[in-house]
Image (cartoon, rainbow, N blue to C red):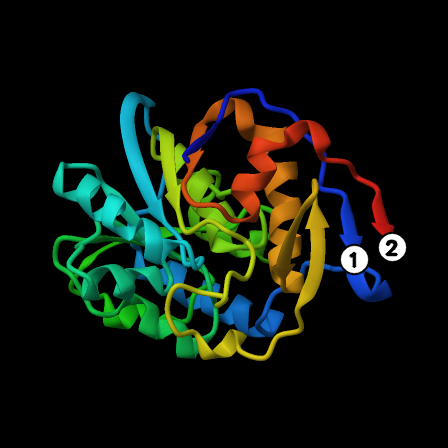
Amino acid sequence: MNQTLQIGVMSEPPSIEVKKLVPVPEIHCAVNEDPKKIRENIKENIQRDLPQVRPYETQWDKVIALALGGPTLNKTFPELLNKRKNGMPVVTVNGTHKYCMDNGLVPSAMVMLDSREFNQRFVMPLSEDCKYFISSQCHPSVFDILKDHQVWIWHCAGDDDNEDLLKEKYGSEYYPVMGGSTVALRAVHLLRMLGFHKLELFGFDSCIMETHHAYDQPENDGEKVLDIVVSGKEFQCTAAHYHQAKEFVQMIQSTGEHYDLAVHGNGLISHIIKNPELLRTKEEVV
């Protein structure tokens, strides 16, 4: 069942019950790369004089599909592929780009945030028909790979440590993209900046459902798993999943009036949308 998150929905971060007397850890958002390296990446990448992602007028009736890497993408992919064949633009992130290309879906665009060099693989296989929206903090090798393709650069809002680089290069003419700590949350705001108001999200689960991704992603193998209950339903989450779910709710509180989201699948995010009245900030250990 598809659940639409209507404009103006307000809810609080989910209450958590943890089985086996294990408390939910205090989770702090942190980058997965050395901040000095990220600064070097930004400094080099902004000298390429690529076009920036910038605000566009809202296309109120246009619907965009966003393919994310959660395990339900496998089950919902036939629907996504059918929508693409019927003309709906599809935007991929990270590993979903290759997943879609390998399964016969050429995306309209691809969004990348991760700064680590080994994740240059995310933009492969290359597509002449795809627009690549690459964060200025990504490794320069990503931009090198894409040098003959359609590339736009974008910047993360809230990166105070590197704002001086952007001001020096662009003056006041740059447009940082707000959002949480994951590419999924940033992609929503990036697409809204580009004028897209209605988004359908596939594979936006923020939980483990037999596997942690719809495809192999060995970096996430072996991560500690939390057994949690949210609004009466059990889920397995990594610390990153749990943090993303909390950030999603906080994001909707702050900016949800500016877009309509439909989340496909039966993961944690879909469950939160179905049960907003049961979400609470209090975390309880049982």
Task: Evaluate whether residue 178 shows in this view.
Answer: no
Q: Which residue is mark 1?
A: 18
In the picture, residue 192 is in which quadrant?
Answer: top left
Q: Are marks 1 and 2 in contact (CB under 8 Å)?
A: yes
For mark 2, does the 10 Å Cα neighbourhood hold few (<14), some (14 to 19), or many (20 or more) residues? few
> Counting residues from the N terminus, which is met first, the one under dot 1 or under dot 2?
1
Instruction: Give coordinates of residue 205: x percent, y percent.
Output: 50, 51
Q: Nearer the viewer, residue 30 or 13?
A: 13
Q: Is residue 61 above or below residue 146?
A: above
Instruction: Give coordinates of residue 133: x percent, y percent.
Output: 33, 52
Q: Residue at x 76, y 43 (%)?
A: 15
Q: Is residue 11 above or below residue 111?
A: above
Residue type at tag 2? Val
Q: Residue at x 61, y 69 (%)?
A: 35
| Quadrant (top left/top right/bottom left/bottom right) for the N terminus | top left
Q: Residue at x 33, y 68 (%)?
A: 122
For mark 1, does the 10 Å Cα neighbourhood hold few (<14), some (14 to 19), or many (20 or more) residues? some
State left or right for residue 228 relative to residue 40.
right
Q: Residue at x 53, y 74 (%)?
A: 220
| Quadrant (top left/top right/bottom left/bottom right) for the C terminus | bottom right
**SS at mark 2?**
loop
Q: Which residue is mark 2?
A: 286
Instruction: Give coordinates of residue 271: x percent, y percent.
Output: 57, 40
Instruction: Give coordinates of residue 132: x percent, y percent.
Output: 27, 55
Q: Is residue 209 above or below residue 16?
A: below
Of the numbered discs in the image, which one, if any, rests on residue 195? none
The mark total stands at 2
Q: Nearer the viewer, residue 232 or 199?
A: 232
Residue type at tag 1? Val
